[in-house]
Image (cartoon, rainbow, N blue to C red):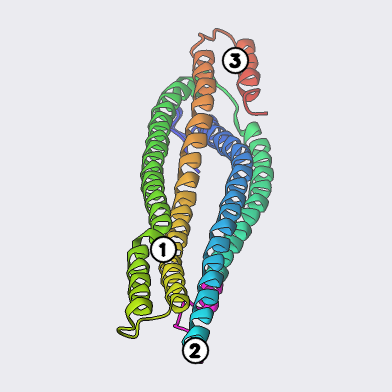
C-alpha cells in the first residue's frame, strides 16, 4: 500500500494513505462484483461452443460411416478382403477427447475463479472496514487530499482507455476469425455438395464403355455395379476429407474466438466499472473542494467521505 504524502507537520499523512487505499479497494471490489456476472456469460459461451462442436463431430463421424460402407461394398464387389484406408474413428475420437479436455479445463478454471472472487470480495470488504478508521481529516490533510484525487483520477482515466482499446482490438480480431470461418465453411459446404458432380463424368464414361462392350463385345470394362461402387467410394472418401478439414478448422477457430470473447468482455466490464467509479470520485473531489471553516464542518465532511465506501 502507498505510504501517503508528507504532511506539513513532517509526518506521513495517514488520511491520504487511507483515502488512496479506500479508493483502490473500492475499485477492486466493484470489479470483482461485475466479474462474477461476466463469468456466467463466459460459461454460457463455452456451453454454446460445446453444442456447436457436437454437430461438427457428428457430421465428421457420419462421413466416416458413409465412407466405410461405400468402401466395404466396393471391397465385396472387387472380392477384396480389405477396403481402402479411411480416416480411422479413433483419430476423430482423439480430437474429441482433446476438445473435451480443453472444455473441462476451462470449466474448472472459471469455477475456481468464482470461488476466488467470493473470497476476494469478502477480503476487500474487511479491508474497507479496516481502512475507514485510519481516515481522520485535519485541515492540513484536507489540503493534501485534492492533489491525491487529481492523481488517482488521471491514472484511472488512463486505465479506462486501455481497457476500452483492448476490448475493441479483441472484438476486431474476433470478427476477422468469424469472417474467415464463414468463408471457409461456405466454401467447404459447396465443395462437399459438388463432389458427386465432380466424379460423375468418370462414371458416365465407364457406363458408356460398358454399353459399347455389350453391343460389340470389345474390351473388358468394369461392370456398372462395380462402377457405381467405385464412384460412391471416391465420392464419400473425398467428402470425408472435406468434413475432417471443416471440423478441425471449426475447432481451432472457435477456441480462439472463445479466448478473444473473454478479452472483449473483460475490457468492456473493466472500462464500464471504472468509468462508473470515476463519476463517484469526481463527486468526492467536489466534496473535498468545499471550503471548511471550523472543526464541526470537518467532522461532517469526514463522515460524508466515508459514506462513499461503507
Whether residue 216 appears in magenta in the rendering, the answer is no
Q: Nearer the viewer, mark 2 or mark 3?
A: 2
Q: From mark 3 to mark 1, how far is it between C-alphas? A: 75 Å
Residue 231, how many percent across, how many down?
42, 71
Residue 12 visible in the current orientation:
no
Can you say whether 26 is above or below 191 in the image? Answer: above
Relative horizontal placement of residue 203, taking residue 78 as reference (left or right): left
- Label 2 neighbour load within 10 Å: few <14, some 14-19, many 20+: few
Label 3 residue SS: helix
What span is in magenta? 80-94
- Front residue of 128/212: it is 212
Q: Earlier in the sequence, mark 1 or mark 2?
A: 2
The number of numbered discs placed on residues in the rendered structure image is 3
Q: Nearer the viewer, mark 1 or mark 2?
A: 2
Q: Quadrant of residue 240?
A: bottom left
Residue 298 is tagged as 3
Residue 84, how many percent across, how many down?
44, 83
Label 1 residue SS: helix
Residue position marked by numbered label 1 in the rendering: 242
Q: Please tell me which residue is depicted at 48% across the width and 21% down the height of the picture.
A: 140
Q: Please tell me which residue is depicted at 60% across the width and 27% down the height of the picture.
A: 136
Q: Please tell me which residue is depicted at 51% across the width and 30% down the height of the picture.
A: 272
Q: Earlier in the sequence, mark 3 or mark 1?
A: 1
Q: Earlier in the sequence, mark 2 or mark 3?
A: 2
Can you say whether 183 is above or below 155 in the image? Answer: below
Residue 253 visible in the current orientation:
yes
Q: Quadrant of the C terminus?
A: top right
- Label 1 neighbour load within 10 Å: few <14, some 14-19, many 20+: some
Residue position marked by numbered label 2 in the rendering: 82
Q: Please tell me which residue is depicted at 48% across the width and 24% down the height of the picture.
A: 145
Relative horizontal placement of residue 209, taking residue 250 as reference (left or right): left
Can you say whether 266 is above or below 150 in the image? Answer: below
Amino acid at each position: 500500500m502507498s505510504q501517503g504524502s508528507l504532511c506539513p507537520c513532517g509526518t506521513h499523512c495517514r488520511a491520504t494513505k487511507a483515502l488512496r487505499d479506500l479508493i483502490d479497494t473500492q475499485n477492486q471490489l466493484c470489479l470483482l462484483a461485475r466479474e462474477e456476472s461476466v463469468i456466467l456469460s463466459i460459461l454460457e459461451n463455452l456451453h454454446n461452443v460445446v453444442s456447436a462442436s457436437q454437430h461438427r463431430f457428428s457430421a465428421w463421424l457420419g462421413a466416416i460411416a458413409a465412407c466405410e460402407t461405400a468402401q466395404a461394398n466396393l471391397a465385396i464387389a472387387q472380392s477384396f478382403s480389405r477396403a481402402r484406408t479411411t480416416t480411422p474413428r479413433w483419430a476423430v475420437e482423439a480430437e474429441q477427447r482433446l476438445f473435451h479436455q480443453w472444455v473441462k479445463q476451462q470449466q474448472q478454471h472459471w469455477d475456481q475463479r468464482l470461488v476466488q472472487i467470493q473470497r476476494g470480495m469478502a477480503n476487500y470488504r474487511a479491508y474497507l472496514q479496516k481502512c475507514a478508521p485510519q481516515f481522520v481529516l485535519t485541515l492540513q490533510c484536507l489540503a493534501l487530499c485534492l492533489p491525491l484525487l487529481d492523481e488517482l483520477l488521471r491514472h484511472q482515466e488512463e486505465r479506462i482507455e486501455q481497457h476500452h482499446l483492448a476490448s475493441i482490438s479483441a472484438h476486431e480480431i474476433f470478427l476477422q476469425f468469424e469472417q474467415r470461418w464463414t468463408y471457409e465453411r461456405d466454401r467447404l459446404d459447396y465443395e462437399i455438395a459438388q463432389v458427386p458432380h465432380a466424379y460423375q463424368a468418370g462414371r458416365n464414361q465407364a457406363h458408356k464403355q460398358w454399353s459399347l462392350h455389350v453391343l460389340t463385345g470389345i474390351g473388358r470394362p468394369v461392370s456398372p455395379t462395380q462402377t457405381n461402387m467405385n464412384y460412391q467410394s471416391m465420392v464419400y472418401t473425398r467428402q470425408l476429407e472435406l468434413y475432417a478439414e471443416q471440423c478441425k478448422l471449426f475447432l481451432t477457430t472457435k477456441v480462439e474466438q472463445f479466448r478473444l470473447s473473454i478479452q472483449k468482455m473483460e475490457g468492456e466490464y473493466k472500462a464500464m466499472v471504472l468509468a462508473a467509479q470515476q463519476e463517484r470520485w469526481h463527486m468526492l473531489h467536489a466534496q473535498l473542494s468545499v471550503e471548511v471553516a471550523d472543526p464541526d464542518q470537518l467532522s461532517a465532511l469526514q463522515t460524508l467521505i466515508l459514506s462513499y465506501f461503507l
